[in-house]
Image (cartoon, coloured by chain):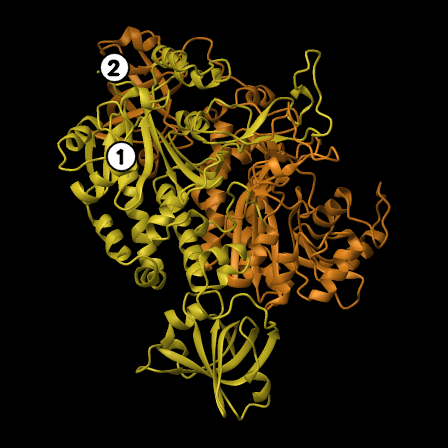
Chain colours: A orange, B yellow
Amino acid sequence: MEKVVTRQLFRNLERFEHQSIELNGWVRNNRAQKSFGFLMINDGSFFETIQVVYEESLDNFKEIQKIRVGSAVTVYGVVIPTPNAKQPFEIKAHKLVLKGDCPEDYPIQPKRHTREFLREVAHLRPRTNLFSAVFRVRSLVAFAIHSYFQEKNFVYVHTPIITGSDAEGAGEMFRVTTLDLDNIPRNEEGVVDFKHDFFAKSTNLTVSGQLEGEAFALALRDVYTFGPTFRAENSNTQRHASEFWMIEPEMAFADLKDDMDMAEGMIKYIINYVLENAPEEMNFFDQYVSKGVLNRVQTVANSTFKRITYTEAIDILLTANKKFENKVEWGIDLSTEHERYLTDEVFKSPVFVTDYPKDIKAFYMRVNDDQKTVAAMDLLVPGVGELIGGSQREERLDILEKRMEEIGVPTEDLNWYLDLRRYGGVTHSGFGLGFERMVMYLTGVENIRDVIPFPRTPKNAEF
Amino acid sequence: MEKVVTRQLFRNLERFEHQSIELNGWVRNNRAQKSFGFLMINDGSFFETIQVVYEESLDNFKEIQKIRVGSAVTVYGVVIPTPNAKQPFEIKAHKLVLKGDCPEDYPIQPKRHTREFLREVAHLRPRTNLFSAVFRVRSLVAFAIHSYFQEKNFVYVHTPIITGSDAEGAGEMFRVTTLDLDNIPRNEEGVVDFKHDFFAKSTNLTVSGQLEGEAFALALRDVYTFGPTFRAENSNTQRHASEFWMIEPEMAFADLKDDMDMAEGMIKYIINYVLENAPEEMNFFDQYVSKGVLNRVQTVANSTFKRITYTEAIDILLTANKKFENKVEWGIDLSTEHERYLTDEVFKSPVFVTDYPKDIKAFYMRVNDDQKTVAAMDLLVPGVGELIGGSQREERLDILEKRMEEIGVPTEDLNWYLDLRRYGGVTHSGFGLGFERMVMYLTGVENIRDVIPFPRTPKNAEF
């Protein structure tokens, strides 16, 4: 008797029709009737559950009737096609064994649970339809990203998580230490003496791997990072977590246009990959999580992304027949309402906004010939806002040094970064994609806590 | 004129023979003669360099003669096959432009550098043959691992990096905090008050994602983690880093034999993938880094891994015609000399050692019927030692609780972990692969600092 998983049966039903099979899984529901009953079984290999019919003739019929939701079972039975039913087949059990019992207090009963409640049982929530779908899609998005870049011969680089630099400048950082908090070593002036810390210096968790990624791009040409990053910001929003994953490609001999082409190609590749590999999950999101998400992402995969400059964007906003809460003028950072107006009302498609004022952007972005703007790009997406931020990097040593001085970035710590301009420095560009943002965009799930297995947010590091 | 990269030329030379192309890259060497010269160019896309011939007839011949090692250039030229030379082709330049200069103090001159020196310029070392090969292979190993598990429908799970648990038990941990070290908050008893810390509790960097992985396996069946893990151990060895990456698959409805099958399949898949995708790099390692490594890994890919119990291993060691420094008796943890004897002298192949005494193994491993051993397995590999450690997990709630009590693992923190046994618990197994160990094994590089882009070790967190 062949041992099978649910995915095989759904994807290759013909091979198994009227065959005897063995299936392991967990009971999602048990509808016991007088002389027969139905077990809905999910084995984790596939989004859908399988209906198992059990009849009075089975030795342990009375025990089977009492099997509770959440229990693990092994089913031996025959695959029966059911062309007129909602499910394409069911399994008629000729033997059914309870493998792992589940008591009545099991929190994941077959009823509607709030997402807040399910966050409290994050170790059990992947057993629900919503979260099994979210986490399978999350996995597929990750693999799509790797595949996209590997097919293009990019080198995957693990940039460091623990960093001695606090100059990355992307946000507040977590300290990493082995100092005894009850006995902090101090020097003669009474200042904390990090010479006694594990790394003999003050260290933090990384907020970005970009700078290290640049070092590798200037050797291996096309590289990408994909790793966890951290923000110690005390903001409790639906879109922010303290620990999240980022993808940061970096390309030598590539300018801002190449950068946008690469980003656009990546988004489309991810969408197509997920549509192809998780149709059941995407249909579920479309029906129960975010109506229209399927059509929305399909449209994006088939569209050409718009590209406008920041200055053009400001002009559009200034002439808009709409009152914004935040004042529009050249030099402002676009706020969510501005971004939404551009994507949802004007363009109705993803749009790259380029060439932002240098004063609102990071020190490493390349100064344009107008001396006022930098070769930056943000990808704004309908319903989500900023999904990607990138730029052509300043490759001219003298201009970079001047910018760092202006902004107050200490050059001593970043001498190695300046070396990348001293020694064979060339045009190079890159961008960052917030991984969870992409998963939220594809699934329609609105709270970042619901797309991370065990989310970390202020005052919360359970499990 | 077509813009190409080195990889295209080497992999698809016929298409480009006698064609005009544009190539961007960095100068590895410049041998200027009186009326002509040779530039060795590497563009990062490929291990090999390309020889570019430039002649007196070029406008800027005199400047080209002076182009220094490390400079970035754009070459416009014709691809000329050279069937009798070491390199299959060269490029005859008809135009050559300096894009990024490089001064004479460039540290990566074309001569032999010690690996110790190159660690000090970790931002430049990927520009050398050794490190470009190592980091490309590292990337391929990572992708091979993802491909192996994704092809088998495993779900990639990002388990948390910051953890509130200190019960993972795999080693000393780094603290993560936003407390002001100059002003540590204390409660009335004078004890550090973590209520004021970012997560309102004491938090650390993870040493393993296994326990969280188990939660996902008991929902999604087959899962794997692939992320950074940390050890705050003050050990300065060639084989230990403070930050390294681990792969931890976890499978429901799988026993120890399934676990070993999966591990063996993975190792072979990785080897075959790298041999196929990085032949130039592997030849380089074989010639210059570790003689015989190519043959060694090929043999492993084609062999059936041996499987012996710990008790059998002890018997072999006891009857060995060899004097060990560490005493051999049932109950000891195998030391490196014992492992080496088994792999290098007895079996001459990878060997799984199973069913270790429970007293030397972790609390979560399943107790065997003999009550003395647990269903654990270590994969020992010739020349490297332990590459993988895994086990069938204890799924029986009462026995697990008893083990935790015996060993002194606090159950309050791990109540969620016990839930996985309470609610539909089943047979499940998993293992951990140290990613860097695998890269060291494949490349023959002996120091873990030389397979990590920016290694973190005691007193060292540069870049």
Left or right: where does residue B144 sit relative to residue A379?
left
Q: Where residue B23 appears, x then y in whole percent?
A: 51, 75
Is B208 rendered above or below residue B291? above
| Chain letter, disc 2 residue | B
Amino acid, disc 2:
Gln
Which element carries disc 2, helix, strand or loop? loop
Which quadrant would residue A34 be assigned to in this image?
A: top left
Marks 1/2 same chain: yes
Q: Residue at x 67, y 31 (%)?
A: B178
Is B369 rendered above or below residue B336? above
Left or right: where does residue B279 sit relative to residue B61?
left
Q: Is residue A297 visible?
A: yes
Mark 2 nearby-residue class (10 Å; few <14, some 14–19, many ≥20): few
Which element carries disc 1, helix, strand or loop? helix
Residue B260 badge: 1
Q: Residue at x 83, y 53 (%)?
A: A331
Residue B78 badge: none
